[in-house]
Amino acid sequence: MQKKTTQILLLILAVGWIIVIFMFSAKTAPESMKQSDGIVDYLIRVLVPDYDSLPTEQQTDISDTMTTIVRKGAHMAEYAILTVILYALISKWNLLERRLLRVVCAWSGAVLFAVSDELHQLFVPGRSGELTDILIDGSGALIGVLLAAGIAYLSDRRRSRKKCLEV
């Protein structure tokens, strides 16, 4: 019964996270920039305490760099999380026996969603679908799936060692 509950919760989590990503993508350009600007402003205040005393050109450079890091980092994080969830979902549902196939399917599923998400953004005012964003999303997905597979591998090794010690 507990396994079935875990499977259902992972499915709900996957669908929920896909909806979260979709909702972020559905924001217009000004809404999206306002959200990331708030995070950028906070990070600048924390990381560059003398920001206000810097020349305007240097402030602009710092702000632009931080904006790129925050926005692209958010893309990577969204898809790393999605891929971890997809990998766990595939694993718990025993959809694929071999770890490599789980990795490929979880990563591919995330990248396919990234493609559809960028297509979706073509219809959102002020937004655009970017190939570079798909590549960034795919990179985040790769980080996520490698993390998930690595944890699964270590967990399997630990269980195997524990069984050997019990015998």
Image (cartoon, rainbow, N blue to C red):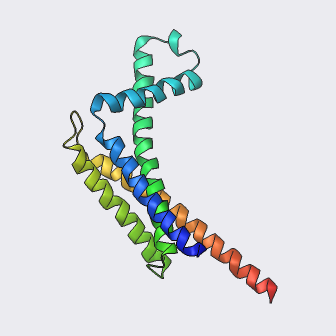
Q: Is residue 98 left or right of residue 31?
A: right
Question: Who's the residue at 37% across and 56% down the image?
Answer: 138
Which quarter of the figure is the C terminus placed in? Answer: bottom right
- Residue nearest the viewer, comparing 11 with 52: 11
In the image, residue 132 above or below residue 112: above
Quadrant in which residue 158 is drawn: bottom right
**Residue at the extreme front of the image, as rendered:** 1
Q: Position of residue 106 (x, y in %)?
A: 41, 67
Question: Who's the residue at 41% across and 23% down the image?
Answer: 61
Quadrant in which residue 115 is drawn: bottom left
Residue 77 visible in the picture:
yes
Which quarter of the figure is the N terminus placed in? Answer: bottom right
Question: Who's the residue at 41% across and 30% down the image?
Answer: 35
Residue 83 visible in the picture:
no
Q: Position of residue 147 (x, y in %)?
A: 54, 61
How many marks can you see? 0
In the image, residue 123 above or below residue 29: below
Q: Is residue 25 left or right of residue 146?
A: left
In the image, residue 24 above or below residue 117: above
Q: Position of residue 100 (x, y in %)?
A: 46, 76
Q: Is residue 28 left or right of residue 157?
A: left
- Residue nearest the viewer, comparing 57 with 108: 108
